[in-house]
Amino acid sequence: MRHGPRLLPALAGFGLLLAAGGWGAMAQDAARPTGDYVLAQLDAARQALAQRATQQPDPALAEAGRQLGQIGDALRRQLGGATAQPIEILGDKTKAAALRADAAAQRTQAWLKASSGCRGSDAKALAAALALAVERLAAAPTSDKPSPPVIDAVETADQQPLFVIHPADQPLAFAVLGANLLDAQCANPQVSLTDAQGKPVDAQPVITGITPQRIALKLANTTGLQPGGYVLHVVPQRKAFLVGCTKQPEAVAALQVAPPLHVVIDYTLSATCRGQGQLTLGHGSLPAIAKQGATVSQPIDAAACANPESYTISATAHFGDGDQATVGPVTQPADAGITAGLPGGLTLSWNPAIHSLFARAEANQCRGSG
């Protein structure tokens, strides 16, 4: 799923062309992007990120915004008085800087869409992933190659943006998208995954499909990945007259591995009892939920209420990073169960037939994680 316009390599002659997905209705110069156009995309992403950061304060978002500003400043310096000129007619170093600036804008816009339903440790991991991605684009060395490779998106197998990995003992299929990732006349690019310090991980990704704009990858498992930042390195080759296939500058993408899920739900269950009024039947904490798909339960001694007319439940979920969310009070007749939803795909249920509370972590609701 594309999240906006992208700069792609031209099929013949020039370095940049318009991607087909969604640019036609945009400004006229989008058909032949200028420096001004790329800078506008970057500025729009930076401003949207600053607005989100007021609602979701996180030092990582502030750092990402600062790096976006640096990327824009560097591109403006390289463009000089040529900001109105089409990127394709400018020098190779300027084209490379524009590709990286566009990639930073695209990655930020994808983050804005993917992170809206995230909270707790997922929200923090997504913010850290964006900061690392933008930092690596800002730190990329200048390149005078005519068609420098760049990655501007990482997606799941179902084409959703991917920023955060939840370790699992099953394969993870994902893809990177960008420009100049393959020259069909040369061998496939070298692909490796390292931690943020450059140390290779034990399980390396395998290419399962490839075009110049997209590389499909698979990790056999992710159980060995510790929480923190990771960098995917793609080093393609390009064929040149007389010299054959030579290595190009690497393109990088950043991901974050989330800490294990840890949620504790505090609850209060009361009943309205005929002839007795309101009684508190249970007040405490359910066992911790430690993984997606897990269910925990707590039996409740309801003997104190001989003739219940209704049950009422309220609860607060405490996430591992200190975030919390509250639901209730929710009241239902005594012969009806209660099911209440909490953020992060959590559900809390009361079964009056067996006098038990249940909590379950459903599939992750954070669209930027896999």
Image: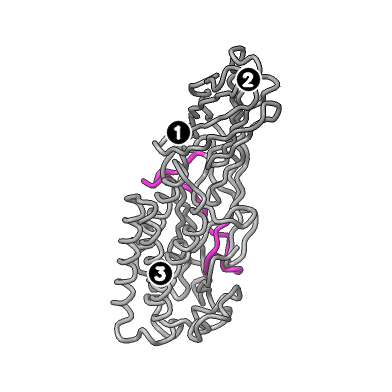
Q: Earlier in the sequence, mark 2 or mark 3?
A: 3
How far, Cα to Cα, is label 2 from label 3?
A: 68 Å
Residue that carries the numbered disc 1 in the rendered image: 318
Q: Earlier in the sequence, mark 1 or mark 2?
A: 2
The residue lying toward the viewer, choosing from 146 and 353, is 353
Q: Quadrant of the N terminus?
A: bottom right
Residue that carries the numbered disc 2 in the rendered image: 274
Percent across and percent down for residue 218 are 60, 48
Residue that carries the numbered disc 3 in the rendered image: 101
Q: Amino acid at mark 2?
A: Arg
Percent across and percent down for residue 47 are 37, 67
Q: Amino acid at mark 1?
A: His
Point out which mark residue 83 bears. none
In the image, residue 212 lies in the stretch drawn in magenta:
no
Which residue sits at x=53%, y=29%? 289
Q: Amino acid at mark 3?
A: Ala
Q: Which residues are magenta?
A: 175-202
Q: What is the crowding at mark 1: few (fewer than 14 residues within 10 Å), some, or many (at least 20)? A: some
Q: Is residue 309 left or right of residue 181?
A: right
In the image, residue 187 lies in the stretch drawn in magenta:
yes
Percent across and percent down for residue 197 are 36, 46
In terms of secondary structure, where does tag 1 sit?
strand
Q: Is residue 217 left or right of residue 45?
A: right
Q: Quadrant of residue 25?
A: bottom right
Percent across and percent down for residue 140 are 36, 62
Which residue sits at x=29%, y=72%? 73
User: Comparing marks 2 and 3, which lies closer to the viewer?
Assistant: 2
User: Comparing marks 1 and 2, which lies closer to the viewer?
Assistant: 2
Q: Earlier in the sequence, mark 1 or mark 3?
A: 3
